[in-house]
């Protein structure tokens, strides 16, 4: 089966991992159908008439990927966290035949862009150990 969900950094700075990361197949795009590119602002004129300004959003679409049963190695999770901690780093997210140019979304409220939990919590953890319950939060930039 071909890999259909990947994340690749675009022009990363020196010292940042540059490979394409295959995402778990069982990630689900939680908010895929809640985006509306059309937005508007309304206000009343002095005569009581309604004035409506309408425009299209060109970027900023939130993409939240989640899989309660999505497993990822600690090494891959550390790569994702390092990418999320790199200011302004952009990626190509390949999702089921469509590519999106994205960046991690840490949110203004301090929401974590990358979340996951270890399968087994013990002190001698290694980079090969697995984590599950993966959540990734992105914003489109183009």
Image (cartoon, rainbow, N blue to C red):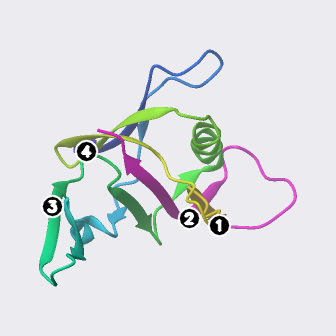
Q: Which residue is labeled 1 in the image? A: 119
Instruction: Say whether marks 3 and 1 touch (CB < 8 Å).
Output: no
Question: Mark 3 or 4 closer to N-term?
Answer: 4
Q: Where is residue 96 in the image (x, y as percent from the top left)?
A: 20, 49
Q: In this view, does 78 lie to the left or right of 8?
A: right
Position of residue 49 relative to residue 103, above or below, is below
Nearest to viewer (mark 3 / mark 4): 3
Q: In this view, does 119 lie to the left or right of 98?
A: right
Dot 1 crowding, Cα within 10 Å, few <14, some 14–19, many 20+: few
Q: Where is residue 60 in the image (x, y as percent from the top left)?
A: 35, 51
Tag shown at residue 132: 2
Instruction: Say whether marks 2 and 3 touch (CB < 8 Å).
Output: no
Residues 58 and 25: in front is 58
Tag shown at residue 4: 4
Q: Is residue 132 magenta?
A: yes
Tag shown at residue 54: 3
Q: Where is residue 57 in the image (x, y as percent from the top left)?
A: 24, 52
Residue drawn at (46%, 19%) of the image: 11
Label 4: state its secondary structure: loop
Residue drawn at (33%, 65%) of the image: 28
Residue drawn at (17%, 62%) of the image: 53
């Amino acid at each position: 089966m071909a890999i259909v969900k990947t994340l690749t950094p675009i022009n990363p700075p020196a010292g940042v991992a540059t490979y394409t990361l295959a995402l778990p197949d069982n990630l689900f795009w939680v908010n895929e159908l809640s985006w509306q590119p059309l937005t508007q602002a309304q206000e009343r004129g002095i005569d009581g008439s309604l004035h409506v300004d309408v425009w299209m959003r060109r970027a900023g679409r939130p993409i939240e990927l989640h899989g309660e049963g999505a497993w990822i190695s600690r090494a891959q999770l550390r790569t994702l966290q390092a990418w999320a901690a790199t200011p302004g780093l952009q990626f190509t997210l390949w999702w089921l035949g469509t590519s999106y140019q994205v960046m991690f979304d840490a949110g203004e409220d301090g929401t974590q862009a990358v979340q996951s939990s270890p399968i087994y919590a013990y002190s001698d953890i290694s980079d090969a150990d697995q984590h599950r319950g993966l959540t990734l939060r992105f914003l489109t930039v183009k």
